[in-house]
Image: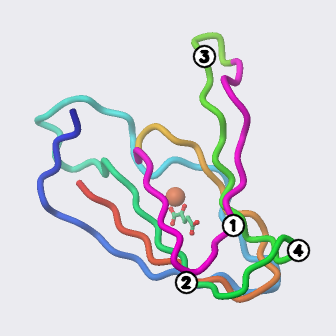
């Protein structure tokens, strides 16, 4: 079960077309503790880029989960930041990275706590 406290944070991000990117990270520490209401629980990203194509870069790379030995389970995925696409994931669980962008890239992110 995911417990949300109703406090949602928003961010409108712009990535410059000169290769702006965001290195591999998670948006929160993983936690199941219901008392810990400060952590981000769910990340939702709405992409705002019309006409985005493969050569434009700027994909969101979702890293495959690791098993208990640190070996990847399942493939990494690349998500194009196309207008109207919404992506949801668990903030404390999913490693992700924004690849270098060759076009102006806009994304509205919300973090639900
Ligand atoms: O813009 C995206 O695709 C994700 C951005 C991101 O990972 C973040 O702001 O934490
Ligand atoms: Fe992130």
Q: Callout 4: helix, strand or loop?
A: helix
| Residue range corresponding to the magenta coloring | 71-91
Q: Disc 4 versus disc 3: distance between alpha carbons? A: 32 Å
Residue 46: percent from left, percent from top: 47, 73
- Mark 2 secondary-structure assignment: loop
Residue at which label 3 appears: 67
Q: Residue 48 carries which label?
A: 2
Q: Name the residue under label 4.
A: 55
Mark 4 burial class by Cα count in 10 Å: few <14, some 14-19, many 20+? few
Earlier in the chain: of badge 4 and badge 2, it is 2
Q: How far apart are marks 1 and 3 (CA)?
A: 26 Å
Q: How far apart are marks 4 and 2 (CA)?
A: 17 Å
Q: How far apart are marks 4 and 1 (CA)?
A: 10 Å
Answer with mark 4 or mark 1, whichever residue precedes in sequence: 4
**Disc 1 secondary structure class:** loop
Q: Is mark 3 on a helix, strand or loop?
A: loop
| Upstream in sequence: badge 1 or badge 3 | 3
Looking at the picture, how far across and down is residue 100, in whole percent? 79, 70
Q: Which of marks 2 and 3 is nearer the N terminus?
A: 2
Q: Residue 80 carries which label?
A: 1
Horizontal side of 23 relative to 89 (left or right) equals: right
Q: Distance between the residues labelled 2 and 1?
A: 11 Å
């Amino acid at each position: 079960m995911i417990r949300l406290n109703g406090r949602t944070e928003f961010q409108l991000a712009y990535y410059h077309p000169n290769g702006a990117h965001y290195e591999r990270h998670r948006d929160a520490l993983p936690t199941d503790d219901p008392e810990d209401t400060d952590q981000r629980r769910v990340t939702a990203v709405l992409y705002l880029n019309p006409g985005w194509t493969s050569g434009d870069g700027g994909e969101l790379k979702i890293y495959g989960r690791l098993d208990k030995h640190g070996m990847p389970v399942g493939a990494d995925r690349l998500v194009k930041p196309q207008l109207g696409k919404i992506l949801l994931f668990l903030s404390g669980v999913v490693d992700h990275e924004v690849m270098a962008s060759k076009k102006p890239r806009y994304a509205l992110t919300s973090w639900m706590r």
